[in-house]
Image (cartoon, grey):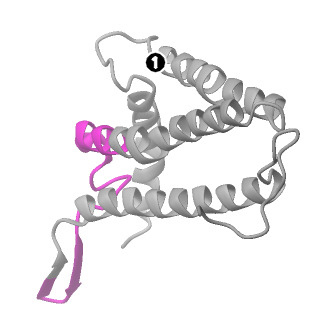
Amino acid sequence: MTLSWFGDFFSALPDALRALYEFGDPESLGRGWWGFLIVALWGVFLVAGPIALAKRWYGQREWLSATMGVIAATAVSWWLFGIIPSAWIYYVDSNKEILQGVVIPASLTITIGTFHWDLMSNLYDVIRDSVVMLETTVATAAMIIAGIRIQERYPRTLASGEVKPDAGGYK
C-alpha cells in the first residue's frame, strides 16, 4: 500500500458523497433531500409519536401503551435490519466504479519482487457484506439492551383494584 492511496481516497470522496446524495434517483439532482424528509417523517409518526403515547398511557392503559411501544420498536427494527443494510448494499453496488479500489479496496494482494500472491480477489464484496454484518450485530445488541432497560424502567403495573397473586400460573 502506498501513500498515493490516501490522495486517491480523498479525491474520490466528493464523487462518493455526491452519489450518496443522489442515491435512489440519479436522474435528477436535488431530489436527494426527499430521502431525508421521509426519514424525518418516519421518525415523527412511527417512532416519536408512539413512544410519547406509550409514556403518556403507561400505568393507565397498559395494552395501548404496550402496543405503541411495539409499533415504535417495529419501526426502528425495520430501519436497522431492513432498510439500512439494503440501502448500503444497493449504494455500494450501484457506485462500484466510484468506490472500488479507491474508497473501498478491491482486492488484497501481496507482491514481493516477482512473487505475486492474490489473497482475496473479492475484498470489495467481503467489506460490503462485513459492514452489513457488523451493523446488524450492533443493532441486535442495542435492541436487546434497550429492551432490558425499558423493562427495568417501566415495569408491568396492575390495573386499579387488581391484586398480585401469591403464586403465578393458571390453576
x, y percentage for residue 102? 34, 53
Eyeballing the image, is 58 above or below 139? above
Eyeballing the image, is 95 above or below 100? above
Number of numbered discs on residues: 1
Quadrant showing the N terminus: bottom left
x, y percentage for residue 70? 58, 39
x, y percentage for residue 49? 70, 23
Q: Disc 1 marks which residue?
A: 32
Magenta region, residue range: 88-117
Q: Residue at x 73, y 37 (%)?
A: 62
x, y percentage for residue 25? 32, 17
Amino acid bearing label 1: Gly
Q: Residue at x 53, y 56 (%)?
A: 139
Eyeballing the image, is 37 above or below 96? above
Q: Is residue 115 left or right of residue 12?
A: left
Q: Is residue 114 left or right of residue 64?
A: left
Could you say which quadrant of the image residue 104 lies in? bottom left
